[in-house]
Amino acid sequence: RVWDGINVLSLAVPQLPFGSYSHLNTRLMETFGFPFVKSLLQSADLIHGAEAYPAGFVAGKWALKTNKPFTFNVIGSDLGLFLSRNYDHLSLDWLNNLRGVVCNSQALQSDLISLMGPLNNVTTIYRGVDTQAFSPTGEKSGPQEELPPVRFLFLGGFHTFDEKQPTYNLKGGNSLLQAWQLVDQLDVSASLVVGGPGDYQTQFIQWKNTLRHPKQVFYAGAIKPSKVPCYIRSSDVVIIPSLSEGLPNLAKEAQACGKPVLGTNVGGIPEVVVDGVTGKLVPSEHPQALSQGIQWFCDHQNKLLQMGQIARKRMMDLFSWRQYQAAMLNFFNRILVVGSDGK
């Protein structure tokens, strides 16, 4: 198919049903996917993996088979969860043709070097945000559209409610539920919409029914990407309570829409949210601190507009899609023209 003028080939390779990110399934993709793309790879100048693992590993193995240079992105959980979990099982040759790495934040770049040691041409390029699609003006939708401030929005979803699973509370959703229970006791005039991936409606409604003010909390479930800016515009503050992050797109999208962010000080979040200027930062996995952050916005409603305006300008100046495009093209050009040895 053709997407935005680019030829796209999708591969469907059989996988074993015990973990989509297991190393065995990655090897199945590398082995059985290669014959379908061999001719394309042989005619390419560079092979790029859109994430560190599994795509980066697959790109490295395919680069060896075709004697092509390769690069990969580091975007977040691909490094913190999947690459680090499988790193000891990887063959030593997958990095032989590596020419460069693009990290989505300085925090990720530091984590990558801590795991893998020094690598050639490792750089940070912030993934840009579409400041036209995500802007203060435009359609609004969602249950908060007609509600008064302060309206909080969380779109991290719940990967699981099982505390034994490694993804439990990864996006901080469970910390948020605990924090909101504290806020609920204060009789503040605030509302919360919870959306995002995962099958959690039953558990969420059970939790909601324990609140003193359940009518101020709303379930949205999975939201279509085209509707995300509409939900953001209907809110006043976007909450990102993650325990681990690369550089969440939602933090940039919210600020591009002129909304401050209440986030945790993990990963690249402090690189995009300026504490006290475009939002507030609190410790991760700390419901008490998160509830205090929610209360702060309720007590300082007069700062919402100014913080949002500064956030919008900062996204336009430093995190636009056009800047990301230019930086990535420059990175690839440097790799292809100059080469990894700098000659």
Image (cartoon, rainbow, N blue to C red):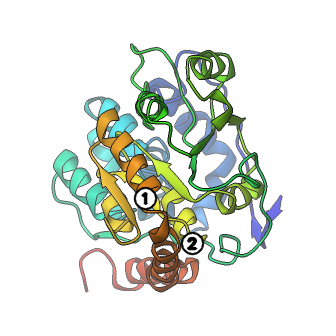
Amino acid type at mark 1: Phe
Q: Is residue 185 visible?
A: yes
Please name the residue shown 33% across and 78% down the image. Answer: 339
As drawn, which residue projects farthest toward the right? 1
Residue 255 horizontal/vertical position (percent): 52, 68
Please name the residue shown 42% across and 56% down the image. Answer: 299
Q: Which quadrant of the rendered structure holds the N terminus? A: bottom right
Q: CA distance from mark 2 to mark 1?
A: 32 Å
**Nearer to us: label 2 or label 1:** 2
Residue annotated with mark 2: 258
Residue 199 horizontal/vertical position (percent): 66, 24
Q: Which quadrant of the rendered structure holds the C terminus? A: bottom left
Q: Is residue 123 above or below residue 70?
A: below
Pick the front one: 121 or 227: 227
Relative to 284, 55 lies left or right: right
Dot 1: few (<14), some (14–19), or many (≥20) neighbours within 10 Å? many
Please name the residue shown 64% across and 37% down the image. Answer: 216
Residue annotated with mark 1: 72
Please name the residue shown 30% across and 45% down the image. Answer: 93
